[in-house]
Amino acid sequence: MAEIFPKNFLWGAATASYQIEGAANEDEKGKSIWDTFSHTPGKIKNNENGDVATDHYHRYKEDISLMNDIKLNAYRFSIAWTRIFPNGKGKVNQKGIDFYSKLIDELLANNIKPFITLYHWDLPQALQDKGGWANRDITKIFADYSEVIAKKFSDRCEYFITFNEPAVFSIHGYLDGYMAPGYKDKNKYLPTIHHINLSHGQSVQAIRSASSNIKVGCTLNMAPCIPSSTNKEDLEATKVFDTYWNRSFADPMYLGKYPEKLFQELNNYIRTDDMKTIYQNNDFIGLNHYQHIRVKSDKNNLLGARGAFNDELPFGIEKDAKLTLMGWEVVPDAYYNQIMELKTHYGNPDIYLTENGCAYPDKIDANGEVQDTDRINYFRKYLSAVKRAIDNGAKVKSYFAWSFLDNFEWALGYEKRFGIVYVDFKTLKRTPKNSYYFFKKLIENNFIPN
């Protein structure tokens, strides 16, 4: 029996500015922390960078035409803060506004709903030089930036997302140094948690002051945490990791409070009315999800706990586990469980699935095709988990594949391909993969094709 999705369900794809736009030094764009980090030797695989990426800045019409060919309903993209404010604040750069205005108009002309992400990790370097998210001053600066974007685009854009995956960019940026800005400092990490939460609250207020037509929420990367062994140390580490990874943003933003352990650590940074400001009436939760997270105790980690990320052979897994090229386990039940946990723990909110996908070693064959059967099978399994969650009462409104295009995959450079459209990074030619045509059938029928 066909698994038919609700009427008006949104089928989309997602991208991020630094990963696809290129044009790193054009039209008065300022430098972001990822411009700096990717040009620091040894930080990125093969010392690659996003200077050109997929050149979406110049090829956006071609890319939107490809979206229209499969009738995508929605497209989630992020705005490069440094295109709007080259130094993070001050005078608006009209050339940056003009680019996103043209992008939005092109999407609407092709019947594609724009979903704007205000921050997808590319903080202006000028703000990082003053402490970045560890400096409380950034909260008002981010709210001011949010208000400008809302005033410019709320006439055409209904959906705004404040942050993409705050747990990821705070932990990997300030605690383990894996991503920009590359710190390993718990004294910098802890205030970033509170200031990001406070920035979200102030951003929501600023957006609502600019327009009453916008639906706004935050996109969180959440996943069930499971211990890598039955050792007491790993069991305790799993609770700790779950607090920082899953609860440090979802709880204050959507429940109005920090987990008790975290509240004690953040108490020095919390001022009168902060929690009230953070706890806004969000219109939805955005969920990014890829796998469950196996956790083990690690005394060398500043949290005392470590999750298996990008290990290519994660610890604690079964020998016959199915893995993607990232070393991530294919576990659709974890997706179902995470969606249902949002339903039960966070008051049955509207849920927008803003990222889900997989990397595999895609190649163009002799017929000029990309036969990404593993990706199609992955989508089938994960979409079936989504449908099961909907059938059990979760208010899921969308599914966005990560990603529309192969792109610059942060610290991993260009090796890991997540797109449903193949990009030759030398010629920048786009080639739709078989998964692209799978999505075409999915959208046409509103059920999972065989």
Image: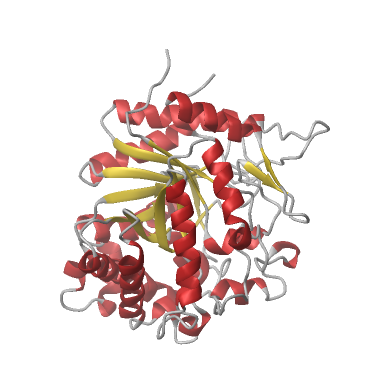
Instruction: Locate residue 165, reporting x and y percent.
Output: 43, 58
Dividing the picture into quadrants, the one containing residue 132 is: bottom left
- Report the side of 83 relative to 373 (left or right): left
**Residue 423 visible in the shown view:** yes
* Residue under the point 48% across and 46% down: 293
Quadrant including the C terminus: top right
Residue for point 62% across, 56% down: 59
Quarter containing the N terminus: top left
Rendered view: 387 above or below 165:
above
Observer-nearest residue: 146 or 229?
146
Which residue is situated farthest in the right direction here? Answer: 366
- Residue drawn 63% across the image and 51% down it: 311
x and y percent of residue 273 in the render?
16, 74
* Residue 447 visible in the shown view: no
* Vertical order, 194 against 435 (above or below): below
Identify the image quadrant of residue 359.
top right
Which is more toward the observer, 112 or 11?
A: 112
- Report x, y in % for residue 84: 45, 75
Tell how many labels. Answer: 0
Going 57% across and 53% down the picture, which residue do you hit?
61
